[in-house]
Image (spheres, grey):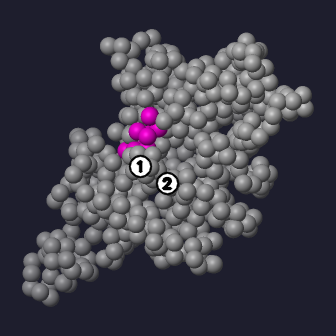
Amino acid sequence: MVYCGKPSRGCQMCRTRRIKCDETKPTCNQCAKSRRQCPGYKDEFDLVFRNETKATERRAQKANRKALAQKGKDLDSPTSGSDKSISPTFKQEVVSPTAVSPGLNVPVEQMASCHFVANYVLLPRQGSTRGFMEYLLPLLKHDQRNHHLQHAFNACALASLGNRPNAAGTGMGDKALGHYTKALAATHIALMDPEQSKSDATLASVLMLGLFENMTARQMGMFAWGSHIEGAIQLVKARGRKQLRTKTGLLLFIAVRTQMIIHTLSTGTAPIMGVEWWLSDAVKDESAAQCQRLNIKTAELRAEVTRLMSTVARSPENIDIMLDMIRRAQTVDQDFVNWMRTTPDYFQYTTVAWEDNVSNGDYSKAEVFPGRVDVYQDFWIASVWNMARVSRLILASVIVRCAAWVCSPVDYRTTPEYATAARTCVDTISDIIASVPYHLGWHLKRPELLERAHISGFACGLEESQKGLPGYFLTWPLACLHGQDYTTDAQRAWVVGRLKFIGDELGVKYAHILSQVSCSDTLNARLFAQH
């Protein structure tokens, strides 16, 4: 099935004449007044969906029977207005579209809206777990005056659909850029207003602008994601603790915290506020919060080590400082190990298969790298695990950098810290690689291997289809593997191939950038030799 947007329920004659139909049954009064023959009304189901398979036809017949049985019930009124903004209300059982029946003449914005929500808006189905951008639809629905948020949403929706392989030449990219430009201007105006600058809609707009950059950036000079995230961090700081009193405010705060962690870990900068500021009273899932606490500590340690190495000279006192940094990093790493051992059952992953070889020996096109294949309860849980793994890779790098500084001019590869880091990195790289097939839809062709707990699901669309969000979650962990000294040549070729797949097939274009840029924390011997 393909979703075709929220339809007009008017008769075909009024729709052709582009006038408002009063929907009187069996014939409308507009046709009666103009002495035209009213052709009647289409089935509700046929207005929304286009049948593509026999199975779909059977589902349509079943839905029609249910509709007849409930004939007396009121239907939701359609969204009206000439503005082609995206309706925030969607059917649950909808497939994200890449094509639509030309006979229905559905505005491209409506097609894009469903595609985006079916690919990026992840809704939790248990009270303790989190989703992704679950705050978005309520904000769009309840306040129609948020033009900056609407334009930002339209930009992301059009970019998401326009980036798919079969959308070339549709002009959606230009439309997306137009909405992005309007969103920037409207958000700037909102930021100048003392009240609007602290609103949920403005913060959500800034996050959406950052997501747009991830979807569309094709070269590093165009990549402005970091500036949007820095702006979002300043906004949550200005909003203060009272933002945590509302559900939407808490969800937005957690969303910014997650983006802040990625930003600080990828740039080597320290968080502008400490761990307690980011975690106190802002916990929705305890397991995820514990992991994020350790992520932030990792970012703080890494930034402190970088500062020390650029400012202190070698002396007995400073060697003691570096040895203390090693101990602190080892403690945080052990905390990660303990976290992994003690997560609740719903947070655990399962190994479901083992791949022995790659057909034709072409790792860049292989769906699975030789080794195990792990599956998770949902994509959000998988992303938390991979953030923990990336932090362990960074901690290993911090430990080896400090050990190299302490033992110089002796070769740092003779130290016990290096041997431990090597084992940690090799195992962690394998763990991240084992999670990739699940993110990219390998399990969809093997449903018998996966027992879902339905902890979260997308806001519309069938779950059994490839999604953009897990590809988006994967890009940075894969980029870090690309830059690791412990990644083998075969693994690196496979990682680059998966990043290209994410950019080409899932439409997350900045994956192409990351396939060419290595993570800044590589264990490069020439770098350490300078300290």
Q: Is residue 415 visible?
A: yes
Check disc 2 and report the residue beneath it: 224
In the image, is residue 515 part of the stretch drawn in magenta?
yes
Residue 344 pos. (x, y %): 70, 34
Residue 346 pos. (x, y %): 64, 35
Q: How many numbered discs?
A: 2
Up-down: is 414 above or below 296?
above
- Residue shown at the point (33%, 70%) measured from the top left: 84
For residue 217, the mark is 1
Q: Quadrant of residue 20?
A: bottom left
Residue 489 pos. (x, y %): 47, 18
Q: State if disc 1 and disc 2 touch (CB < 8 Å).
A: yes
Q: Secondary structure at mark 2?
A: loop
Amino acid found under the numbered disc labelled 1: Ala
> Which quadrant would the C terminus be assigned to in this image?
top right
Q: Which residues are magenta?
A: 507-516
Q: Nearer the viewer, residue 299 or 434?
A: 299
In the image, is residue 147 part of the stretch drawn in magenta?
no
Q: Is residue 380 left or right of residue 466?
A: right
Q: Nearer the viewer, residue 263 or 311?
A: 311
Q: Is residue 129 visible?
A: no
- Residue shown at the point (46%, 27%) measured from the top left: 495
Residue lying farthest bottom? 33
Residue 135 pos. (x, y %): 56, 60
Q: CA distance from mark 2 to mark 1?
A: 8 Å
Amino acid found under the numbered disc labelled 2: Ala
Residue lying farthest right? 317
For residue 37, the mark is none
Up-down: is 313 above or below 260?
above
